[in-house]
Image (spheres, coloured by chain):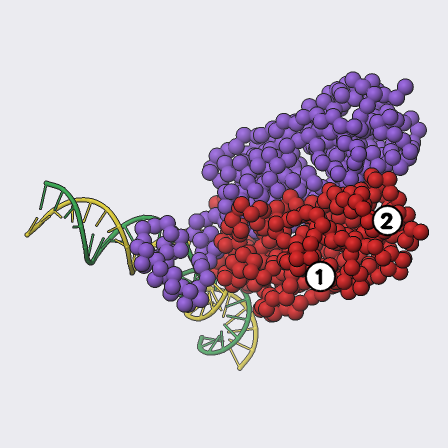
Chain colours: A purple, B red, C green, D yellow
DNA sequence: CTTCCTCCTCAAATCGATTCGACAGGCTCG
DNA sequence: CGAGCCTGTCGAATCGATTTGAGGAGGAAG
């Protein structure tokens, strides 16, 4: 019945008495409101945004960065009446490269939280489905909306800060290079083959400051324990640097812990800088020197891109600003 | 066309040549596969499970416990071809108590991750919609599937462990009592008014061991900083206890940090026990004494309940076992 | 050669809400 | 008093895939 629809939506012209009559009848018949599936089919949109998270949820969500961006995104989409469908990225090489949801789930827009690389199976699948896309932290791709931050220049800021403090022997602890998730000092060839754009850009920021790192240490994920492992390796090896730049705060905090463990003073013996600007209460009393990025705003920016895509527009790439936040973990080079 | 459907699904009897012909025509016409909305309407199911997370995502996801359970759940549901729709719980009292998604999103089953209490607006709304429900860590409710753990007896195990070490003056740091999220030592009346079942059960486990806490300290959320605040208050006040039991590992680790900050030795001056059995690399070299719960299994158990509900069954309440894991943060009472 | 059977193809009904268009009734204004 | 308008109600078409059941073509057996 068409009148019933009006009664529930409340949209069209309908007399108060009729509406009440319909609602009463509905309760009597045990009808619990309109079926969303019918509405969705008719309107041609599901009200759902598929969000492809990095790899295993477990790992993604242990990263406060993803979580805070996701939080901002969910908030922004909630305002628009849109829901977030969680889609796991490919977990490990033995599994199929794309989750079945990517192929068959109903979604009006898809968001790639980890910056799909060129020739990415998930990205390709979504394009074949003609799903509008927003990519976070990825590279520029035609016809794909994107949100990023000033990765490269932000890193340069941090490195310049260390240079001003007199450091010259600087090591870098990086985010993963590619899906293989290697670990350890990277060769030049390996560096040339970096697939993940974030890693590449932030590394480029070091070069931009005119610094050649004593070592580029690759980690398999942005987690404290991997940062600690890297820190141990770098600080206990020969040829110890006086400063370490990590590509995330979680990695940087691991480095700080490793230094403490080795009896080294931070920043007396070694300075440490991170990236993200997180609040890390358990690092107290230290406060990490870090390049702060606006996480919730990033989520909100993605939400705005989604809205524009749904309105039929073609959003321009958004690049959000970052700021160097100087904490207690960087200081003058030891004499 | 009906044959087209068969061609894409591959299910029915169809000749190979015909299928190829259909697929070719589809590509030519720019048809990108069947529209999920049509299928969903026809089949009467969306393949989506709505997961209502605690409160703000930000807070929920900073809690590794929620994250790991969610990870297990997503994995289990993925096997069943089901997707997870993220639904924020009510964030703060000023906002409407239920997210619009609860009312209008398409979902075959809903999961309440935080144990809906009686008279909970979200729970009521979902029941009015006749949505099958699974409640995690909630109380028993008729017609609602539930998954829980041996909260109460697990806590008793930890307290007995402390008793055996000779402790008699034991303080408790708890999870939130209700949505108001108070903070500080709780009065008896306030304790009687606890709304969140988890908090109540774990507190009951202390009583079961025959212990009357020197103080029951309420925190607004299971986060390191709140644990640290509680630890500072309890340890720097008069009448210092020799042991502290926290209702989560995050809280417990905050207490350990506070003790270190105050120059107290753990477990020399004060013993600390937690709950959850998390891996906390940044607490090194300490390993928290804790009641370990099977987090991924919990998610998988919820997945199984969902499957049974979808098959038309009425799953029985599942209670998963816990185990006391003794670490380095508990020791004999100081002399 | 006829009949029956099997395998495939296709037309039509169905899921449930939205929405356009038509119509009826009451009202106002000329 | 009649024409036109406005409000409220209802019938019918539509979204797109699934699925049932009928029918046709081809092969095999009697």
Residue B225 x/y as whole percent: 73, 42
Q: Chain of mark 1?
A: B
Residue A90 higher or lower than B48, as above or below: above
Q: Secondary structure at mark 1?
A: helix
In space, the residues marked 1 and 2 are separated at their CA atoms by 25 Å
Q: In the image, what residue occupies the spot 60% across and 53% down?
A: B52
At horizontal 71% and vertical 27% (from top left) the residue drawn is: A325
* A40 vs B315, nearest the viewer: B315
Question: For the residue labelled by badge 2, is the local secondary structure a helix, a strand or a loop?
Answer: loop
Residue B129 image point, x, y percent: 50, 60
Any part of residue A319 in sight: yes
The spot of residue B315 in percent (x, y) is 64, 68
Image position of B268 with respect to A30: above or below: above
Q: Residue at x 32, y 55 (%)?
A: A16
Labels 1 and 2 within one chain: yes
Q: Residues within 10 Å of mark 2 (few under 14, many from 20)?
A: many
Q: A202 left or right of D2?
A: right
- Which residue in the protein does label 2 denote? B270
Query: What residue is disc 1 on?
Result: B201
Q: Is residue B21 left or right of residue B223?
A: left
Subunit under mark 2: B
Earlier residue among tags 1 and 2: 1
């Amino acid at each position: 019945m068409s009148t019933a629809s009006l009664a529930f939506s409340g949209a069209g012209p309908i007399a108060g008495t009729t509406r009440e009559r319909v609602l009463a009848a509905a309760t009597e018949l045990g009808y619990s409101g309109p079926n969303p599936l019918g509405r969705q089919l008719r309107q041609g949109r599901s009200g759902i945004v598929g969000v492809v998270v990095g790899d295993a949820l477990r790992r993604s969500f242990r990263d406060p960065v993803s979580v805070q961006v996701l939080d901002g995104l969910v908030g922004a989409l909630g305002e628009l009446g849109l829901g977030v469908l969680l889609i796991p990225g490919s977990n490990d090489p033995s599994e199929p490269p794309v989750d079945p949801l990517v192929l068959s789930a109903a979604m009006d827009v898809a968001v790639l939280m980890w910056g799909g690389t060129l020739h990415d199976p998930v990205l390709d699948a979504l394009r074949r489905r003609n799903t509008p896309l927003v990519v976070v932290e990825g590279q520029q791709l035609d016809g794909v909306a994107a949100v990023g931050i000033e990765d490269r220049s932000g890193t340069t800021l941090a490195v310049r800060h260390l240079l001003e403090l007199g450091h010259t022997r600087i090591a870098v602890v990086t985010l993963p290079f590619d899906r293989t998730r290697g670990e350890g000092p990277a060769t030049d060839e390996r560096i040339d083959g970096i697939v993940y754009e974030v890693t590449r850009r932030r590394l480029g920021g070091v070069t931009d400051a005119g610094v050649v790192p004593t070592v580029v240490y690759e980690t398999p994920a942005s987690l404290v324990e991997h940062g600690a492992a890297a820190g141990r390796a770098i600080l206990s090896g020969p040829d110890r640097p006086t400063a370490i730049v990590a590509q995330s705060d979680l990695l940087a905090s691991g480095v700080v812990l490793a230094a403490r463990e080795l009896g080294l003073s931070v920043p007396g013996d070694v300075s440490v800088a991170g990236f993200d600007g997180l609040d890390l209460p358990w690092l107290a009393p230290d406060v990490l020197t870090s390049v702060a990025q606006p996480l919730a705003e990033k989520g909100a920016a993605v939400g705005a891109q989604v809205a524009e895509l749904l309105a039929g527009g073609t959003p321009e790439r958004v690049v959000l600003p970052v700021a160097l936040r100087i904490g207690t973990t960087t200081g003058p080079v030891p004499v």
